Amino acid sequence: MRPDHLEKLNLWFTEQLAALKAEGASEQDLKAGDVADLALRRIFEEHFSEIRTDEVFIEEAFAAVSEKTFPEDLRQLAIQARTLGNLEIGPYLDLIANCREEQDV
């Protein structure tokens, strides 16, 4: 994923976490894979009009938020997020990957 796109997803993701917290989610709730997955999917819903203006970004964003995205792909994105400046979304992408693996079992 292009670094500027990943940084934008990170910003929106942290906004989603803050919104969930304002809605009453606890720190423990935010560390649950399904809650993190919900925050990630909300990005696509709430920022679709901005994302769709860039053909590359829409493909990258959809690949990141789709429930069909393989856990290994999320982990690669998490590695990129950590190397790009330790973006907050990195550990959550690992968490979501683990959650999706557990759901597939």
Image: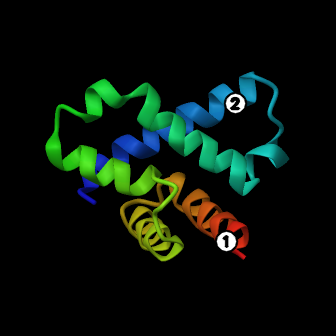
Instruction: Give the structural element (helix, strand or loop) at label 2.
Output: helix
The percent position of residue 48, horizontal first and vertical second, equals 34, 30
Q: Position of residue 12 (x, y in %)?
A: 46, 35
* Amino acid at circle 1: Asp
- Which quarter of the rendered picture does the C terminus lie within? bottom right
Q: Residue placed at 42% from the left, 62% from the top?
A: 81
Is residue 59 found left or right of 29 in the rendered image? left
Say above or below: 80 vs 34: below
Foreground: disc 2 or disc 1: 1
Mark 2 to mark 1 CA distance (whole Å)? 26 Å
For image coordinates 45% across by 45% down, the residue present is 10
Question: In this view of the protein, which residue sits in the foreground, 98 or 12?
Answer: 98
Tell how many labels: 2
Q: Nearer the viewer, residue 12 or 72?
A: 72
Relative depth, front residue between 35 and 15: 35
- State which quadrant residue 19 falls in: top right
Query: Which image quadrant for residue 60?
Result: bottom left
**Residue name at image x 48 percent, y 77 percent:** 72
Instruction: Tell me the tag on residue 39.
Output: none
Answer left or right for 62 relative to 74: left
- From the top left corner, tell me how far across and down residue 86 is, in percent: 47, 60
**For the residue marked with disc 2, what is the amino acid?**
Leu
15, above or below 36, in the image: above
Residue 62 pos. (x, y %):
36, 49
Q: Which residue is mark 2?
A: 20
Instruction: Judge left or right: residue 83 versus residue 28.
Output: left
**SS under mark 1:** helix
Residue 104: assigned label: 1
Q: Residues within 10 Å of mark 2 (few under 14, many from 20)?
A: some
- Quarter of the image with the N terminus in it: bottom left
